[in-house]
Image: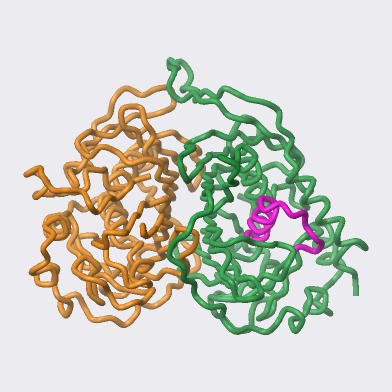
Chain colours: A orange, B green
């Protein structure tokens, strides 16, 4: 499990600069092994010294997408299901082994094994679809203040003594603006719902796969927060033990990750040491871009 | 009015239980085969436990997705041992339907051990016919643990006893052909649609949500794996109906080309599939020939027991031409 030990002590100078995501999506391809195509990518250094689940998912999506592009460049990702199995070393690269499950008339399905030095960190299943038409509907965007009306993280975290929170949020690839206040700087008011505006810090190329990878990456930051918020618990709570168990994402419509996206989140249930988070991403103009779900292990050590 | 069910509805449940009683046929060493002429290497090989089971007969000859979900879940669970005397119940599954299945041909289930850790066991199952996967599923099991407890409350709906049965609801609509279809599929699950069903006629109100009371038509054995599997089976029946309801389409619409694409399910708390369970569903979005259904299952006492999500392909062919 991708254990996220919030007690990790800071030490490495490089921990204070989390670089952008694009270099990590520039995967190298090695020799294929039978039907399996093999890619590798560099890991992002993280304050807690484990690979970030969002990074593994974004890299796996790009790897799988590259095996679809060859046959039909117009097939876009529409769903990704991830199972997290073990935490990885954030100072070492990961291998992405892409196995073809099916190439049909409309859909291409892939499975990706994410490994590090032969150990399995995560498995993903992904599906891509040729453009098609059909019934159209979408739930409307909830009525929340626009991103300009929400305090940015720099002011929200001013005076927070733990530098890693600032590092992650100020220098990570994604800017996050919590409408109901963040869960880094103190215990929130109990509420199983929250909204977060998010946006890549840099302009991205016009490649739909890159935008999908960024949204997949960004979704992993806050998807479990409504389960914590339901109980008024902050990330910095020393009792908290948490790990991502799985992740599912459905891409409904093409969106840009370098423009503001509203991530509307809710936790329907917490039980048995686990919590479920469900999210929806809307473009600022109200278009529903994606639905997200993740179950996490959430325990309080007493 | 023609009858919808065989004389003994419990026979349909007994048959489902037979389908879930998988036969273990041994271990297999699986190799990912290369394209013709390519060299195979040691990578892409792993040991699996193999089970085999038949399918329910279907009028259209294709395997019902809920059946493969249920069987794959049972296959995975049969390879998860109690550790230190502590059982590990299922808490989640994620599946892709990658090819249509042949209902007249047995299915093999290849189970791969992905992880056996201190708290969690993870399996991958491939359901295979004719040498190719029809379904690929990841399943996770967890030793019981304590943690943060909360849940959304059950919405207020009429009790199941106050909702018409399918027979009552279809009533005069039910011609001989439709009756034969329902009898042939002899459902082991009773479904009572609170807002009316969408089998033969579309919904009058075009909204993207609905509630259905469900339960097995006969008592099930006290095996938690069977109860979870039967709910997985049942969950696949109506989950895309909010999409159809929203667009005023009935299952019987001859233009409709439906197919399940994926399925995710989270088991929050212990379940009993032979007790009335409220299945509340909605569809946040449909586009590009696909629709997403999300659902929750509540025990009759209001306990939230399951969350579920499925994307389906839902296209309307404007002509009757083949292909």
Q: Is residue B262 visible?
A: no
Res A189 → quadrant: bottom left
Looking at this view, is A51 or A200 the one in front?
A: A51
Q: Quadrant of the N terminus of chain B?
A: bottom right
Q: Is residue B225 magenta?
A: yes
In the image, is residue B250 above or below residue A169? below
Where's residue B22, x and y in %?
A: 73, 39
Q: In the picture provided, is B253 more to the left or to the right than A140?
A: right
Q: Is residue A187 visible?
A: yes
Q: In the picture provided, is A253 more to the left or to the right than B27?
A: left
Q: In the picture provided, is B295 more to the left or to the right than B108?
A: left
Q: Report the residue at 17% width, 56% height from top.
A: A168
Q: Report the residue at 67% width, 70% height from top.
A: B277
- Marks counted in the figure total 0
Where's residue A24, x and y in %?
A: 20, 41
Looking at this view, is A94 or A34 the one in front?
A: A94
Query: Which span of residues is magenta-colored?
Result: B216-236
Where's residue B26, x and y in %?
A: 67, 26
In the image, is residue A42 above or below residue B26? below
Hey, which residue is sitting farthest front in the picture?
A302
Q: Is residue A214 magenta?
A: no
Where's residue B251, x and y in %?
A: 67, 67
């Amino acid at each position: 499990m991708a254990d996220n030990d919030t007690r990790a002590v800071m030490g490495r100078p490089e921990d204070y600069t989390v670089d952008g995501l694009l270099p990590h999506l520039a995967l190298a391809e090695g020799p294929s092994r039978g039907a399996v195509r093999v890619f590798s990518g560099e890991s992002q250094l993280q304050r807690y010294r484990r690979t970030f689940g969002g990074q593994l998912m974004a890299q796996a999506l790009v790897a799988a997408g590259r095996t679809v592009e060859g046959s039909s460049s117009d097939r876009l990702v529409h769903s990704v299901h991830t199972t997290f199995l073990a935490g990885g070393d954030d100072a070492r690269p990961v291998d992405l082994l892409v196995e073809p499950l099916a190439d049909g008339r409309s859909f291409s399905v892939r499975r990706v094994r994410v490994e590090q030095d032969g150990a399995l960190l995560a498995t993903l299943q992904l599906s891509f679809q040729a453009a098609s038409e059909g019934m159209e509907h979408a739930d409307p965007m909830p009525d929340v203040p626009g991103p300009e009306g929400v305090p940015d993280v720099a002011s929200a975290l001013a005076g927070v003594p733990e530098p890693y929170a600032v590092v992650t949020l100020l220098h990570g690839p994604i800017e996050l603006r919590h409408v109901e206040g963040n869960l880094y700087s103190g215990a929130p008011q109990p509420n199983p719902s929250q909204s977060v505006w998010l946006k890549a810090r840099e302009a991205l190329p016009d490649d739909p796969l890159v935008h999908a990878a960024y949204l997949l990456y960004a979704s992993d930051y806050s998807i479990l927060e409504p389960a914590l918020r339901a109980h008024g618990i902050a990330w910095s709570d020393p009792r908290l033990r948490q790990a991502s168990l799985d992740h599912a994402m459905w891409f409904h419509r093409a969106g840009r990750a370098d423009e503001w996206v509203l991530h509307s989140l809710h936790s329907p249930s917490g039980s048995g040491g686990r919590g479920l988070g469900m999210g929806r991403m809307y473009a600022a103009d109200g278009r529903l871009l994606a639905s997200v779900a993740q179950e996490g292990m959430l325990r309080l050590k007493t | 009015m023609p009858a919808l069910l065989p004389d003994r509805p419990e026979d349909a449940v007994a048959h489902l239980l037979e389908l879930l009683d998988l036969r273990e046929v041994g271990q297999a060493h699986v190799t990912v085969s290369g394209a013709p002429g390519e060299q195979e290497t040691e990578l892409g090989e792993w040991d699996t436990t193999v089970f085999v089971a038949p399918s329910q007969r279907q009028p259209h000859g294709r395997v019902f997705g809920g059946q493969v979900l249920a069987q794959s879940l049972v296959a995975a669970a049969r390879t998860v041992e109690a550790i230190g005397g502590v059982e590990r119940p299922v808490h989640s599954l994620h599946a892709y339907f990658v090819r249509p299945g042949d209902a007249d041909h047995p299915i093999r289930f290849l189970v791969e051990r992905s992880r056996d850790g201190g708290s969690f066991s993870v399996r991958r199952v491939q359901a295979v016919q004719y040498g190719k996967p029809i379904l690929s599923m990841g399943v996770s099991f967890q030793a019981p643990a304590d943690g943060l407890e909360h849940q959304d409350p059950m919405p207020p709906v009429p009790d199941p006893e106050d909702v018409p049965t399918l027979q009552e609801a279809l009533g005069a609509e039910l011609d001989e052909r439709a009756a034969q279809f329902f009898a042939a599929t002899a459902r082991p699950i009773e479904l009572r649609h609170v807002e009316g069903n969408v089998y033969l006629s579309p919904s009058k109100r075009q909204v993207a949500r609905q509630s259905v009371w469900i339960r097995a038509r006969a008592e099930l054995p006290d095996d938690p794996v069977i109860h979870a599997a039967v709910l997985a089976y049942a969950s696949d029946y109506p989950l895309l109906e909010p999409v159809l309801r929203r667009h005023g389409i009935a299952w019987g619409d001859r233009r409709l080309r439906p197919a399940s694409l994926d399925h995710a399910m989270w088991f929050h708390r212990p379940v009993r599939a032979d007790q009335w369970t409220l299945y509340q569903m909605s569809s946040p979005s449909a586009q590009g020939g696909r629709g997403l259904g999300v659902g929750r299952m509540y025990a009759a006492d209001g306990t939230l027991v399951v969350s579920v999500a499925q994307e389906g392909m839902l296209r309307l062919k404007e002509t009757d031409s083949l292909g």
